[in-house]
């Protein structure tokens, strides 16, 4: 039982000679209440925690009194902070008392109080009342990218988590992305980073991180995304600098004045025939503003800029 929440005590009665008119309910030998009408039930909750032994005695219209009923044992756990959660249960699950019964610690849309009442674990997203959810984790995008050492992969690593029973997308499911081999770091949307990081799915069931490549060329890295023992593996690589055909990297900008700046980059494409500098304004179409057949070129001065315009640039290596 839960302090402050009534239990409905009720008995079944029969009388071969008269009619049952009253049932008295006792805790041990102390009368806790009476019911004088069928179905002879009594709402009851004690004023303190503890274990109680409830019995019932029936009286009929002829003055007969029944023997005591079988004992019903009811336990009301200690709840000193009066939040509906037994203190020992709180300490076991959370490590301390004072947790709100209406809170949802694990994000599974079930309150802590509901999880206590239904025997599930409030710190385990997949323990949901009487049900244990088994997830399915699927890669959506970001696998197999090849980028420059020390740089972020072009696209985030994205997975979807669904319920194996019915296939529904799971919202707020925890997903841990872990760099298993190769190196590099994973970042969440607020720039927390590490070799392992845990994020939650959105309402579409998707979870994502951003992957920064290790500081070594020609390295293949593996990153797992796991949830409740189910996992998938991303494979990312750094092949820049292998002497074949790799794009320029590390573009930097040095301001000259309000209408021009110096753009520089690093070359890796030793097999390229030309290098293009491309520009777009305010998210429009890309246009080539410079072409170099000398593939050792690593800088260009951009001119003709207009105030208030957002410019983007990319350096492209190509072959005839």
Image (spheres, rainbow, N blue to C red):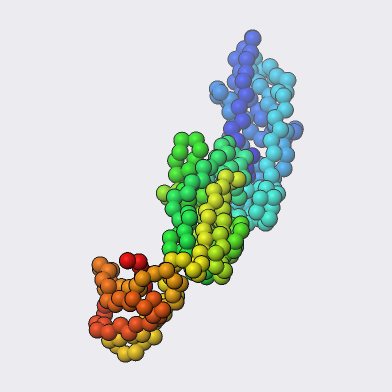
Q: Position of residue 315 (x, y in %)?
A: 36, 72
Would residue 192 appear left or right of 319 to someone viewing this image?
right
Residue farthest right in this picture: 29
Q: Nearer the viewer, residue 309 or 266?
A: 266
**Above or below 281: residue 169:** above
- The quadrant in which residue 249 appears is bottom left
Total marks placed: 0
Residue 5 position, x and y percent, is: 58, 42
Res 314 seen here? no
Q: Is residue 269 above or below residue 38?
A: below
**Residue drawn at the location 51% of the way across and 58% of the way down:** 236
Residue 141 seen in render:
yes
Residue in view at x 47 percent, y 49 percent = 139
Give above or below for 272 relative to 33. below
Quarter the N terminus occupies: top right
Q: Quadrant of the C terminus?
A: bottom left
Left or right side of 97 for 158: left
Q: Residue at x 52, y 53 (%)?
A: 234
In this view, the residue in front, 68 or 265, is: 265
- Residue 272 coordinates in the image, percent (x, y): 39, 69
Name of the residue lying farthest toward the top: 17
In the displayed structure, does residue 233 sit left or right of residue 296? Answer: right
- Vertical side of 156 occupied by 118: above or below: above
Q: Nearer the viewer, residue 108 or 47?
A: 108
Residue 205 percent coordinates (x, y) = 45, 48
Between residue 39 and residue 129, name the one nearer to us.
Answer: 129
* Residue at image point 60% right, 36% down: 7
């Amino acid at each position: 039982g839960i302090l402050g929440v009534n239990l409905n005590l009720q008995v079944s009665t029969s009388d071969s000679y008269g009619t049952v008119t009253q049932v008295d309910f006792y805790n041990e030998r102390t009368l806790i209440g009476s019911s004088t009408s069928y179905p002879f039930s009594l709402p009851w909750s004690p004023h303190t925690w503890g274990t109680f032994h409830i019995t019932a005695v029936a009286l009929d219209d002829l003055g007969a009194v029944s023997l005591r009923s079988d004992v019903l044992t009811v336990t009301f756990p200690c709840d000193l902070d009066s939040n509906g959660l037994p203190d020992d249960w709180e300490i076991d699950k959370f490590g301390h008392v004072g947790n709100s019964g209406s809170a949802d610690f694990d994000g599974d849309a079930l309150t802590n109080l509901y999880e206590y009442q239904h025997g599930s674990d409030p710190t385990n997203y997949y323990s949901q009342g009487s049900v244990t959810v088994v997830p399915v984790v699927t890669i959506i995008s970001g696998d197999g990218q090849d980028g420059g050492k020390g740089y972020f992969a072009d696209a985030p690593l994205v997975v979807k988590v669904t319920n194996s029973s019915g296939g529904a997308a799971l919202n707020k499911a925890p997903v841990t992305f872990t760099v298993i081999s190769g190196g590099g770091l994973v970042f969440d949307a607020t720039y927390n980073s590490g070799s392992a990081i845990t994020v939650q799915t959105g309402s579409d069931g998707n979870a994502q991180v951003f992957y920064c490549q290790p500081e070594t060329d020609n390295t293949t890295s593996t990153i797992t995304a796991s949830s409740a023992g189910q996992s998938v593996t991303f494979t990312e690589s750094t092949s820049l600098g292998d002497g074949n055909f790799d794009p320029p990297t590390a573009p930097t900008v040095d301001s000259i004045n309000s209408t021009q700046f110096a753009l520089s980059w690093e070359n890796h494409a030793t097999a390229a025939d030309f290098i293009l500098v491309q520009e777009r304004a305010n998210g429009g179409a890309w246009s080539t503003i410079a072409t170099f057949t000398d593939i050792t070129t690593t800088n260009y001065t951009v001119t003709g800029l207009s105030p208030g315009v957002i410019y983007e640039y990319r350096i492209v290596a190509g072959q005839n």
